[in-house]
Amino acid sequence: MTEATIQHDVFISYRFEQRVRYFVDVMESQFEAAQPPITYWRDRRNITAGMGWEEAIDDAINACRIVVVIITPEATQSQYVNYEWCYALGRGKHIIPVYFDDSDVHVKLRKIQALDFTSRRSEKPPWDDLITQIQAKKQLPVGKGESLGTRIEAEIQHLVNTVPSGQPIQIDQLIDLLMRERQIDHAQVHRIQDMLLRHRSAKS
């Protein structure tokens, strides 16, 4: 991925819920009003009928410089949101976590400076801080980062540790995608399958 292929400043990663949708609408307005304006990619605006979801997401992240991850309890349990930020880290993209609700997050995200919007009803939301961070990161190069397979394996380990024993973890489609894209190797697949087998067989 070269600088010349960057098409948008920001990829917005979130778990679709009505209340979060309104928040993302406001975020878009803030981006458009910024000086200079911040260009962005959002799934429900940019994925059209007939497009393959996985390919569209990968292409969009590759074409963006920054990924803003909107943190909610539902988002932290979403395989799609987890895939997006893991893939972005693996591609060396800049990540900005945005807390919409209080929620536990993966240790990788906890190490990244985040913005807290959880008090948005009683205090001024930190939109200016978000815009400032994005404008600063727009000037920084993007790198390759560590392997996506390593990050995905770590994320699955996190899910195994946090989802109650006996409850299903549906990631077969994700593993198949990673194998097809050669982003994860057979040894990692075997370790992941072993983790899931032990998790399914454990008693609550």
Image: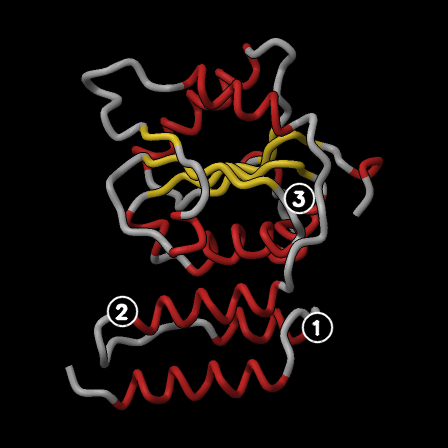
Q: Kindly identify which residue carries mark 1.
A: 182
* Mark 2 / mark 3, whichever is N-terminal: 3
Q: Amino acid at mark 1?
A: Arg
Q: CA distance from mark 1 to mark 2?
A: 27 Å
| 92 and 118: which is toward the camera | 92
Q: Nearer the viewer, mark 2 or mark 3?
A: 2
Q: Which mark is residue 163?
A: 2
* Mark 1 / mark 2, whichever is N-terminal: 2
Q: Amino acid at mark 3?
A: Ala
List x then y, in percent, for residue 64: 67, 38
Q: CA distance from mark 2 to mark 3?
A: 29 Å
| 110 and 55: which is toward the camera | 110
Q: Kindly identify which residue carries mark 3.
A: 60
Residue 46 location, quadrant = top right
List x then y, in percent, for residue 164: 21, 72
List x then y, in percent, for residue 52: 65, 56
Report whether 188 appears left or right of 4. left
Q: Amino acid at mark 2?
A: Val
**Answer yes or no: do the residues labelled 2 and 3 have beta carbons within 8 Å?**
no
Q: Secondary structure under badge 1?
A: loop
